[in-house]
Image (spheres, rainbow, N blue to C red):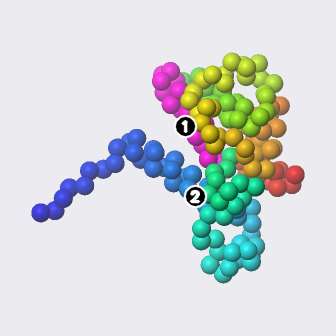
Amino acid sequence: MESVRTPPSRGSRIRGSLLAGAVGDALGASIEFDSLEAIRRDFGPEGLRDYAPAYGREAGAITDDTQMTLFVAEGLVLAARAGALHRPSERLRILHRAHLRWLHTQGVGARHPSFPGIVQEGWLLPLDGTARAHPAALVSRDCEARGWGGWSSRSIRANAVAV
């Protein structure tokens, strides 16, 4: 008798996506800005085959990419709870506050007037491992702290490499 496979639940698919992103982030952190030539030079002709230390952290540590993904997910959950998923300006306000909470984990205070009160929202701030991003986040942090939103991830990374 053939067994019937039950499709994964929506929550299971979301958790799987977040976990897969974190694993990929941790695996690729040590080679994030390297050329193929540099990767083969440092890790051999087959390239990276396991976690490696990156940005002064132990092998397998996540970077700001996963941190910000988790804060966006937290913001989307808070927006859903507030009934704001189909109200763009309210959804963006909640997501902006989620990014400001991430900024708080980096030890940076924002000049945004709502910043002091928002650190109490959500559930990620008390968790270990949400702090200490890598150098690519420095430009992102500075832009958020100055209130310069709207930079694309491509321009942030390009400017972070230039710094």
Residue name at image x 53 percent, y 26 percent:
79
- One can see residue 82 in this view: yes
Residue 78 magenta-highlighted: yes
Disc 1 and disc 2 in contact, CB within 8 angstroms:
no
Image: magenta residue range:
65-84
Please, what is the dominant secondary structure of the magenta stretch?
Answer: helix
In this rendering, is residue 142 above or below 63? above
Where disc 1 sits, the SS reads: helix
Neighbour tally class for label 1: few under 14, some 14-19, many 20 plus, Cα within 10 Å: some
The residue indicated by pointer 1 is: 73
Q: Quadrant of the N terminus?
A: bottom left
Q: Nearer the viewer, residue 17 or 121?
A: 121
Residue 145 falls in image quadrant: top right
The residue indicated by pointer 2 is: 24
Q: Position of residue 120 (x, y in %)?
A: 63, 22
Q: Position of residue 61 (x, y in %)?
A: 64, 53
Residue 102 disc label: none
- One can see residue 28 in this view: no
View extreme (left): residue? 1
Q: Position of residue 7 (x, y in %)?
A: 30, 50
Residue name at image x 16 percent, y 62 percent:
2
In this rendering, is residue 82 above or below 34? above
Where disc 2 sits, the SS reads: helix
Q: CA distance from mark 1 to mark 2?
A: 17 Å
Q: Position of residue 129 (x, y in %)?
A: 63, 43
Residue name at image x 62 percent, y 39 percent:
128
Residue 95 magenta-highlighted: no
